[in-house]
Image (tube, rainbow, N blue to C red):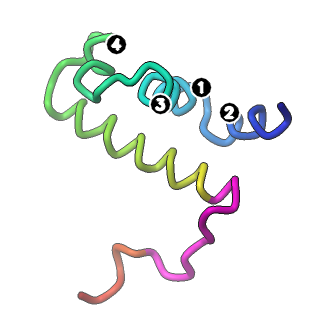
Amino acid sequence: MLRLNRAERELGADGSALVHDVLVHGLTMDQVGQRRGLRTQRWNEYFSRRFRECLDRLALLYGFATEHPIPVKSLPR
């Protein structure tokens, strides 16, 4: 129970609700937006990006990943 409380604090209220909607209720990003009255493509992209951030945060919290010393976006390709 302590880990779940910490996860909720780490994700915040919105992040926790988003993760719950997707992982527990099985909603798509489009459905998440519809439930919140935000139906544009831009909002769907925001929810997708935010969900990915939440999953990354949970992976760190539960020890499935480690912090990358260099932000991935700045690595040369």
Give the residue type that dot 2 points to: Glu
Q: Where is residue 23 in the image (x, y as percent from the top left)?
A: 47, 30
Look at mark 1 in the image and give the residue it sits on: 13
Q: Is residue 68 left or right of residue 73?
A: right
Q: Residue 23 carries which label?
A: 3
Give the residue type that dot 1 points to: Ala
Q: In this view, does 76 lie above or below 64?
A: below
**Quadrant hosting residue 60:** bottom right
Q: Nearer the viewer, mark 2 or mark 3?
A: 3
The Cα–Cα distance between marks 4 and 3, rounded to whole angstroms, is 17 Å
The Cα–Cα distance between marks 1 and 2, rounded to whole angstroms, is 7 Å
The Cα–Cα distance between marks 2 and 4, rounded to whole angstroms, is 20 Å
Mark 1 vs 3, N-terminal side = 1
Helix, strand, or loop for circle 1? helix
Considering the image in quadrants, where does the N terminus appear? Answer: top right
Mark 2 vs 3, N-terminal side = 2
The Cα–Cα distance between marks 1 and 3, rounded to whole angstroms, is 15 Å
Mark 1 vs 2, N-terminal side = 2
Q: Do the residues labelled 1 and 4 touch (CB within 8 Å)?
A: no
Q: Which residues, given as a range, are shown in magenta?
A: 60-71
Mark 4 vs 3, N-terminal side = 3
Give the residue type that dot 3 points to: Leu
Q: Position of residue 3 (x, y in %)?
A: 79, 40
Look at mark 4 in the image and give the residue it sits on: 36
Q: Is residue 73 above or below residue 75?
A: above
Mark 2 surroundings: few (<14), some (14-19) or many (≥20) residues within 10 A: some
- Residue displayed at 33% across by 35% down: 47
Q: Do the residues labelled 1 and 2 touch (CB within 8 Å)?
A: yes
Mark 1 vs 4, N-terminal side = 1
- Residue displayed at 34% across by 13% down: 36
